[in-house]
Image (cartoon, grey):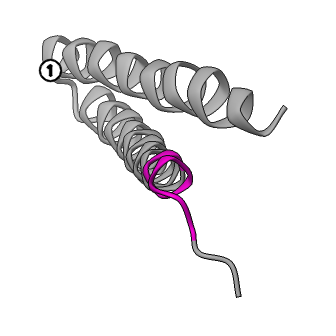
Amino acid sequence: MTSIGPELLAESLSLVVYTIVAGILTVGGVLVEQASVQHLGAGEAMIALWLAALGGVMLYAGAYGLGYQKVLSEYV
């Protein structure tokens, strides 16, 4: 039986952490965008715009920044 080297273990652990953080940011971004739409429907435009900007940043960071550039680049 072969043992897992420390380099492989560290690389695998960082990939798992990036995947989890990317998922959390993406789901959080979707939820914040949903809250933005609800605040816009309630007539609170300033809060809705603030939440829309925050949700956009979270979606960009989760889906593109971590998900595409970090996680998928490790698989290819």
Image quadrant assignment for residue 25: top left
Q: Secondary structure at mark 1?
A: helix
Quarter residue 49 falls in? top left
Q: Position of residue 65 (x, y in %)?
A: 51, 19
The local crowd at label 1, few if under 14, some if 14 to 19, many if 20 or more residues have their Cα within 10 Å, is some
- Which residue is located at x 21 percent, y 25 percent? 43
Eyeballing the image, is 22 above or below 48? below
Instruction: Report if residue 6 lies within the magenta region.
Output: yes
Is 4 placed left or right of 58 in the picture? right
Q: Is residue 2 above or below residue 49?
A: below
Q: Disc 1 marks which residue?
A: 47
Q: Would residue 31 be found to the left or right of residue 8 on screen?
A: left
Residue 12 image point, x, y percent? 54, 54
Against 68, residue 32 (above or below) is below
Q: Where is 61 relative to 7, above or below?
A: above
Instruction: Give the prevailing secondary structure in the magenta stretch.
Output: helix
Name the spot of residue 76 as percent of width and height, x first: 84, 31
Q: Horizontally, is 62 left or right of 1 in the view?
A: left
Residue 16 versus residue 25: which sits nearer the camera?
16
| Magenta residue span | 4-11
- Could you tell whether 17 is left or right of 54 in the image? right
Q: Position of residue 18 (x, y in %)?
A: 45, 42
Residue type at mark 1?
Ile
